Amino acid sequence: MAAIVRRQLALQFPSLSCAVTPLSRTGVRTPACRSQPNRTSPSPFNRRGFRTSPASYEKKYTKDHEWIELSDDKTEGTIGITHYAASALGDVVYVELPTLDLEVSAGDTIGAVESVKSASDIMTPVTGKIIATNEKLEEKPGTINKGPEDEGWIARIEIGDAKEVESLMNLNDYRKHTEE
């Protein structure tokens, strides 16, 4: 069984094959290992995925721990709560999503997040119209805990006033805000 595992590891990770070859009775690596060239293969952790590069989207934050990620043309944004807010809430058990086509102003309540510890309103960081909601959260509200700034997004908004975005914090300013 161990030989099969070593063989599979050696095939998957050729650069590590010396590390998985057995020691001889004297405790020295076998000659086959020493004669192997030092090959480097791409790490499975460095494989390129189909994610959008951080430069193509701009994320802004509010003092109330919401975020908005802007599209390239800054006409739409995705809204959610931050990691900081999700960890403060604890295990999320219910998410109230906003109504589609709802016209909102910056600071308006668009929904709520309830956890075993407390409940918190979700406020929109900008003026606009709700164009989509993350319906996955209705069935699996804990998704917010797993990825509040990724798959745990709450709503998408068509931005009405792009100048409001400029008043929001960037990541560095938000980090300073949470450290206070």
Image: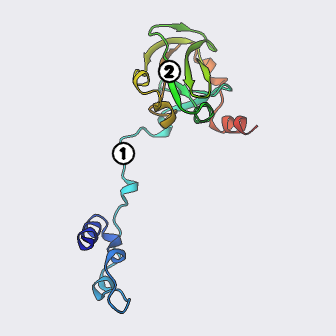
Task: Give the residue pinned by disc 1.
Answer: 49
Q: How is the image coloured?
A: rainbow
Residue at x 67% of width, y 23% of height: 167
Task: Give the residue pinned by disc 2.
Answer: 95
Measured as percent of width and height from the top left, residue 48 is found at 37, 49
Residue 22 lies left or right of residue 86; in this view the side is: left
Using the image as rendered, state which of residue 150 and residue 167 is in the foreground.
150
Question: Separation of disc 1 and disc 2 at Cα?
Answer: 30 Å
Q: Which quarter of the image is occupied by the N terminus?
A: bottom left
Using the image as rendered, state which of residue 103 and residue 158 is in the foreground.
103
Residue 29: which quarter of the image? Answer: bottom left
Measured as percent of width and height from the top left, residue 140 is found at 42, 27
Q: Judging from the image, what secondary structure is the residue with disc 2 in?
A: strand
Amino acid beneath label 1:
Gly
- Graded by Cα atoms within 10 Å as few (under 14), some (14 to 19) or many (20 or more), the crowding at tag 2 reads many
- Graded by Cα atoms within 10 Å as few (under 14), some (14 to 19) or many (20 or more), the crowding at tag 1 reads few
